[in-house]
Amino acid sequence: MYSIMSFVSIFYMLDESVVGVVVDICARSFLVLSDEGREKKLTCEDVDQFMRVLKVCNDTLPVELIKYDSITT
């Protein structure tokens, strides 16, 4: 289980900057992309956790860095 603080710490990777986050609503997951090409995936255990992490993204990142994965049916 990831806590909000675990996710926030991803944003403060040493010598790296976040250049994007891909939000997958169906999978309740986030893919954090760094300027050095690293990727970190966070999968939330429930809707409440997903919404809290999404709020952290919305509160700390410019809107142009947040992308949403397409919903497949």
Image (cartoon, rainbow, N blue to C red):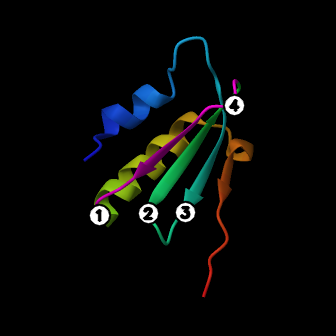
Sequence-wise first label, 1 or 4: 4
Which residues are the magenta region? Answer: 36-45
Relative to 49, does residue 5 appear above or below in the rendering?
A: above
Marks 3 and 2 close (CB-CB < 8 Å): yes
Instruction: Please name the residue that numbered disc 1 is placed on.
Output: 46
CA distance separating discs 1 and 3 = 13 Å
Which SS class for mark 2?
loop
Where is residue 7, by image quadrant? top left
Residue, disc 3: 24
In the rendered structure, find residue 37 and report the number of the disc placed on it. 4
Question: Which-is-in-front pick, marks 2 and 4?
Answer: 4
Mark 1–mark 4 CB contact (< 8 Å): no
At label 2, which amino acid type do we have?
Arg
State the CA–CA distance, disc 3 to disc 2: 6 Å
Foreground: 18 or 54? 18
Residue 6 lies in quadrant: top left
Residue at 47% across, 57% down: 29
Eyeballing the image, is 25 above or below 14?
A: below
